[in-house]
Amino acid sequence: MRHLVVPVVLMAVWVGSGCSSDAVSQHTDTTATSSSTVSLGPSTTTAPPPSPPADGSTLFGVRYCEILTTNDGEDSEIAEVWNTMGLNDCPQGAWDAIDLGAVQTHLGADEVATNGPRYWVLDSIAPGAMTGSLEVRDLDGVEMRSIALVDLADIEADATSYVELSVQRETEFTFLAGREIYELTAPDGSTYVMQSYSLEIDPDQTVDDLSSLRNRLDLPDGWTFTSRVLSEDFKVEDQNGIATVVTDNLRNTYQLAAHD
């Protein structure tokens, strides 16, 4: 029995109306080499989309998990992403108890991988695209929805942290005034804003730990980590249809912010 080896999961997509009148949430989590590109498959909408956040206003603090599967009999480079958003908050006990072999058999997959739990640290994302079937299944005790197809062809197995991945998607991340944001800055001055934090490496990490994250990161030479509180709403957008993403060594994810 084989299991898909992916350094960090690639895609999470959530659709709802709670963040704003046209809010659609999409998220990419990965580490890969600088020229890699993720391309999405054809869109389908055969089931209702997930529900909006419980408080109806923000994605901040919303928890989710994912499972990726591939099928060598079809296209081993295309991964189907199953996500808990809108169904449950990925209870830790149930997540820890998942038998990937049972999931592999249930879905008829050749390889599987997990991602999460993760928590959003942004408020909304718009627009977005659903590329999975939206089918809901009980995956060994955790309900998940098929929300995306991801092309793994250019993802390298030995990918490392603090290296850019280019993702083909058009999204706008919004962080509201008063929100604390967390930024990595590369030696060339490029700044990446955290979009979600992970419990994969440090299961005890909380949002309260993020302000002092610099003390726990293995930053490459010339890289810095800072945090700041916003005095006005702040947006992070793709650049000409490409979102550039990096992860730190704790698998927290960040997207490149456009320069002024």
Image (cartoon, rainbow, N blue to C red):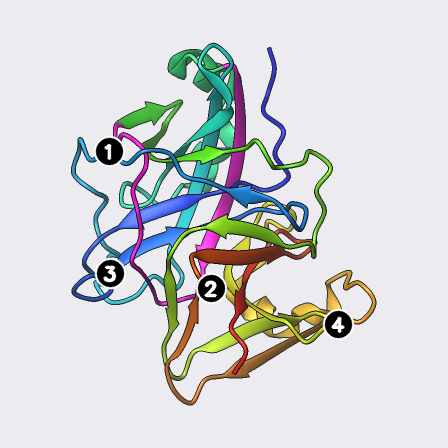
The mark lying in front, picked from 1 and 2, is 2
Query: 102 or 242: which is nearer to us?
Result: 242
Q: In the rendered structure, are the residues bearing label 2 and label 4 in contact, judged by CB atoms less than 8 Å apart?
A: no
Distance CA(mark 1)–CA(mark 2):
25 Å
Give me the residue at 60% from left, 67% from top: 209
Give me the residue at 24% from left, 64% from top: 19
Q: Is residue 152 magenta?
A: no
Q: Which residues are magenta?
A: 110-135
Query: With respect to residue 258, does 255 lie above or below?
Result: above
The mark lying in front, picked from 1 and 3, is 1
Quadrant showing the N terminus: top right
- Three-letter code for the amino acid on which mark 1 is drawn: Thr
Query: With respect to residue 146, does 28 lie above or below?
Result: below
Q: Which residue was labeled with disc 4?
A: 187
- Three-letter code for the amino acid on which mark 4 is drawn: Pro
Query: 22 or 94: which is nearer to us?
Result: 22
For the residue labelled by badge 3, is the local secondary structure a helix, a strand or a loop? loop
Task: Classify residue 50 by image quadrant.
Answer: top left
Q: Which residue was labeled with disc 2?
A: 239
Distance CA(mark 2)–CA(mark 3):
19 Å
For the residue labelled by badge 4, is the local secondary structure a helix, a strand or a loop? loop
- Three-letter code for the amino acid on which mark 2 is drawn: Gln
Is 203 on the left-hand or right-hand side of 175? right
Q: Which mark is residue 44?
A: 1
Give me the residue at 44% from left, 41% from top: 65
Say few, some or many: other residues with alpha carbon within 10 Å of mark 2 (under 14 / 14 to 19 / 20 or more).
Answer: some
Where is residue 100? Give x, y as percent. 51, 21
Distance CA(mark 2)–CA(mark 4):
20 Å
